[in-house]
Image (cartoon, helix red, strand yellow):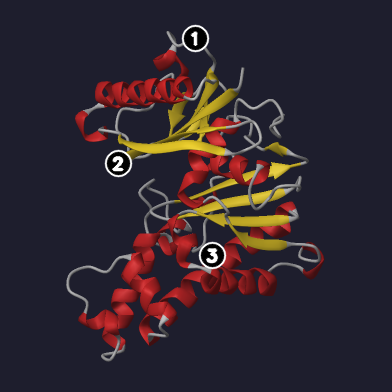
Amino acid sequence: MTKYYGGIDLGGTFIKAGLLSENGDIIHNFAFPSRVEQGIPALKESLRVVARKLVEESELRGAALAGIGVGSPGTIIFPDGIVTGATPNIPGWVGTNISGIFSDFPFPVVADNDANCMGLAEATFGAGKGTKNGFYLTLGTGVGGAMFVNGAIVRGASFCAGEFGHMVLVYNGDTCKTGRKGCLEQYVAAGALCRSAMQLAGKYPDSALSSQPGELDVVDIFDAFKRGDQAAVEAVSANADMVGVAIGSVVNLLNPEIVVIGGGMSQAGEKYIGLIRKSVFSFAFESTTSILKVEAAKFGNDAGWIGAACLNIGSRPLP
């Protein structure tokens, strides 16, 4: 019988989920409200609804569901999915045993950090396919990272590895939501880009951003950037330069074959990725960039659930 692998990507607003074949073909995908604002019991029930939907979709296609993987924000003990920290967008989630939510389902359910899942999707079937040493990052509302060394995810001694967004970019700088100062996320995430662009809009009265009603969002900024708007170009260029310098530090440390940039901001296109690439190559040692590629993620916002599905695929590049 044909086997499919279910993947669930838990977000603060929506749960994205889908079915994947063992060869990486997307069979079906959908989204469902996470209901985080209604509390943890409602969130758990949303996850169970999504899991049942995955079972139904497999059965409709005459296939068996071999297992489900879940990607969750926070520090996650793999494979059981015990949440031990860093989930500010899901209050009360710390302490949850994610696998335990599905204890009555007749197949394995494993869980990992959502950035690790994004990296796993891209390393297995996406932009990093065929490489063994890679760094995978997400740029959006937050900033996350995943590292592969010799084909295996680096999870760390207590499953905290890859916190790219909380590298310190500015000593004693702006306060992060974690309470630390100067974290990269405070300077390059979507909110930081919006703040920078709004400040620059005042410097350039002719900018389309200066006449934008209400608060700017990254879609407005990147649209203006693509049109050559001066305020947007300056804001995006500064953002890309900071991202590139931070990636360059990781490149000097890990010497990867590939850096893959995902998350909502990566969908701004090759012009933005090209600016980041230029910054990386300007900052990192020439010896560490001699074979390096810096690419946009292949799977976009689907990477989280695809990578979660890969957690149960036998050929996955795991330890």
* Of residues 59 and 157, the one drawn nearer to the viewer in this rendering: 59
- Give percent across and percent down for residue 24: 62, 38
- Give percent across and percent down for residue 14: 32, 39
Residue 13's disc number: 2
Q: CA distance from mark 1 to mark 2?
A: 28 Å
Mark 1 packing: few (<14 Cα in 10 Å), some, or many (20+)? few
Nearer to us: label 2 or label 3: 2
Q: Residue at x 28, y 79 (%)?
A: 209
Q: Amino acid at mark 1?
A: Pro
- Mark 3 sits on what residue? 243
- Circle 1 sits in a helix, a strand or a loop, which is it? loop
Quarter in which the N terminus is drawn? top right
Nearer to us: label 1 or label 2: 1
Quadrant housing residue 204: bottom left
* Of residues 238 and 301, the one drawn nearer to the viewer in this rendering: 301
- Mark 1 sits on what residue? 106
Mark 3 packing: few (<14 Cα in 10 Å), some, or many (20+)? many
- Circle 2 sits in a helix, a strand or a loop, which is it? loop
Which residue is outermost to the left? 213
